[in-house]
Every structure is written in structure tokens, then in C-alpha cells.
Amino acid sequence: MGKDAARDSLGTRWRRSLHRVRLGLRRSAVDYFRGDASDWLALTVLMLTVPALAYTTVCIPVWCPPSALVLPILTGGLLLRPASLLVLYTSSAVALVVEAAVLGPYRDGPSRVTPGIVLVVSAVALSGLLIAQFRSRVGVPWRGGHTMLFDLRERIRVQSRLPRLPAGWHAEMALRPAGGQSFSGDFVVATRTLGGRVLEAVLTDVSGKGMDAASRSLLLSGAFGGLLGSLPPHAFLTAANGYLLRQNWDEGFATSIHLVLDLESGDYELLSAGHLPGVQLSAGTGRWEEMAAEGPLLGVYDGAEFHGVKGTLRSGDVLLLFTDGLVEAADRDITEGIDRLIGEADRFVATGFRGAAWRLIEAVAKDVNDDRALLVVCRD
């Protein structure tokens, strides 16, 4: 029994040790991915690369010129911290001196260390140092920077997803950022309230466009998503206006249109904060009607009041909500842009509006250098 207990105790200790090693490796891998770990491994590899390149340059300078040292220098600018980068630069400078001494004066033949090569290597080294200092100051390592941007983009997309609607209803949203970028100043937040009976959707256009408005758009979409459904419908824009005023942004205004739709009766109300009117198609008459609510821009002054306009979506009716990038252009006014949008939307009356949001943007404002968003709500 004593030997068995000893073997069990030894096995337990081994398992615990193995578990600690596994956890340590896992934490190290996570830290390295995030950029929190030490850069000694990358520095060691690059420090070994420098003499290897110098030796190859001395042996076969035709295939490995002295300017090849820019490769570890450029890689170090992406991987290393500024202090480690200086160590790498010192070794690279020593390698250049050795190459110049072994190969001889640059006037004696090609593949020598010329003043131009020294200038090129120095310029790349300076660029790498500036990049490393910027990353160090911002606190975002290169290994995690692209991941963070991807995560921000996906969060905006997730927050813009429309909730599933009951049978007989269809809603879709299409978003096209300016310049083909991944970030937009336009966004939509939506939810179902009162036990799923009411659909609330807010389409917002933040001042600016593309990357210039992306950070404010992300912040506002998160805040608006938290407010939506937590407040009575008529209190939402008032709370959103107060939130923008508290940010004290230099360019902090935005426009919003808030849809409150009863999914049982089809009755709805639109509340606007300086936003363009919605347009509704009445299937009974085949006519489009502008639904214009009144209200000032968000983030301009305190105590703003927002007055809604009411309507009803019956069978076959369609409601379009959009941002100004879809209908405004330098060579035409907004009224003409809305008429053009309605004209294109008429093409979908016979076939239905499923999948129409993206195609309408393509037809009306494909090459416009502005953020474009379109929300389509229809009753089958």
C-alpha cells in the first residue's frame, strides 16, 4: 500500500506539473498574440539573421546585396519594441561596416556598400523606429491591431442586425460605407419590445463619413443599442440627444429617425432628429408618400423636442428609411434624389422587396463618395 500510495503521489505531482506547464505555455501564447509578452524571441531570430545576411553578402554579393539588411530592419520595426529595435540597429550598422571593409571601396566594382545603400538602410531604420514608437505610444501591438479593427467592424455589423420578424413581415438593411471602406458613419440599431409585439429601429447618420466617423459611430451605436427598448419610445431621442451633448465633440451632431411599429396592427410612428423623411408605398393606390417628422439635430442644444408622424402599413405596403448619402449629390437636390429612389423602388413592386435594399443602393448611389444606408420594412 505504501508503494502504491507513493506511485500515486508521484503521478499526481507529475500531472500537476504538466498542467502548470500547459497553462504557462497557453498564457505565453495569448500574451504574445496580444503583444504583452517579451520580444526576446523575435529579437534573437533577427539578431541571428543580420550576421547570416552579412556573411552571404560577403560570399555572393551579386545575389545578396548589402541592401538586404533592410529585411530584418523592416521586420524589427513591426515586431520589436523601440529599445530592442535599437539593439538590432546597432548590429545592422556593424554588419554594414564589416561588409564595407571586406568588399572594399565602392569605386572598385559593383555590389559594394555605396553611400546610397547606407542612406536606404538608414531611411528604412528610421521608418521602423517611428512605427515602433507609435505602436508603443498607442499601446496597440501590430499582432493585435488588425484583430482589434476586425473586431470593431464585426461589432458594428452585429449591432446592425435586424431582429427576426413574425410571418407576414419582412425587414432588411443595406449599408455601403464611403470609398469602399469597412467602417461607416451610418448605422442601424433595432429590437423588439413589449413581448415582441413592437419593432423599434433607429437609423442614424453621424457627422462625417467613413473612417473619420467610424469611432463615433461605434460609440453611438453601442449607446443607442442600450437605450433602445429600455426607454419609452418618445423618450429615446431625448436621451440620445443628452448623450451626444455630454460627449462635447467638436463635430458631434448626428441625425436619426426612430421607427416604432406595431407588428399586430401595422400602425407605426416615426420620430425624427433632423433626419430625412421616410417614404411609404400604399399598395392600394400605388402611390408613394413622404412621412416627415419634425425635430432638431442630435447634439446641438439641450431641451430639444421631437414630434412624430403616424401611419399604418397594410398588406403590400412598404416603408423606406435612408440616409442623405443615398439621395443627395452635388449636381441635384435632395428632392430629385428621393424621386429617383422612388422611381427605382417602383421596379420591385411587382416582384417584391426581398433583397431590394442592396440593389437599390447599387442603382441609385453606387459610386457616391458618402456613407449610404437603406432600411426596408414591408408587409406581405
Image (cartoon, helix red, strand yellow):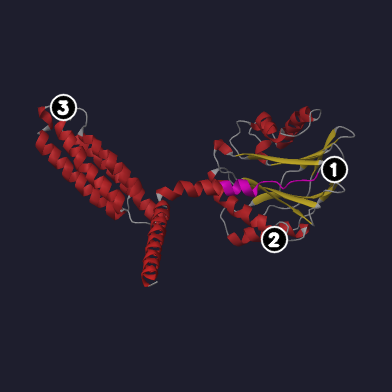
Query: Which residue type carries mark 2?
Result: Ala
Name the quadrant of the C terminus.
top right
* Crowd rating for badge 3 (residues with CA inside 10 Å; few <14, some 14–19, many 20+): few
**Magenta residue span:** 154-166
Q: Position of residue 258 (x, y in %)?
A: 74, 50
Q: Quadrant of residue 225?
A: bottom right
Q: Earlier in the sequence, mark 1 or mark 3?
A: 3
Is 27 above or below relative to 343? Answer: below
Q: Position of residue 16 (x, y in %)?
A: 40, 64
Q: Position of residue 157 (x, y in %)?
A: 61, 45
- Foreground mark, 2 or 3, reads 3
Q: Quadrant of residue 113?
A: top left
Is 128 above or below relative to 25? Answer: above
Q: Are marks 1 and 2 in contact (CB under 8 Å)?
A: no
Q: Which residue is mark 2?
A: 239
Q: Position of residue 22 (x, y in %)?
A: 40, 57
Comparing 302 with 199, the one in front is 199
Query: Which residue type carries mark 3?
Result: Pro
Q: Which residue is mark 1?
A: 313
For mark 2, give the secondary structure: helix
Q: Are marks 2 and 3 in contact (CB under 8 Å)?
A: no
Q: Which residue is mark 3?
A: 110
For mark 3, give the secondary structure: loop
Q: Earlier in the sequence, mark 1 or mark 2?
A: 2
> How far apart are the alpha carbons under marks 1 and 2?
28 Å
The structure residue drawn at horizontal position 68% and vertical position 29%, both measured from the top left corner, is 363
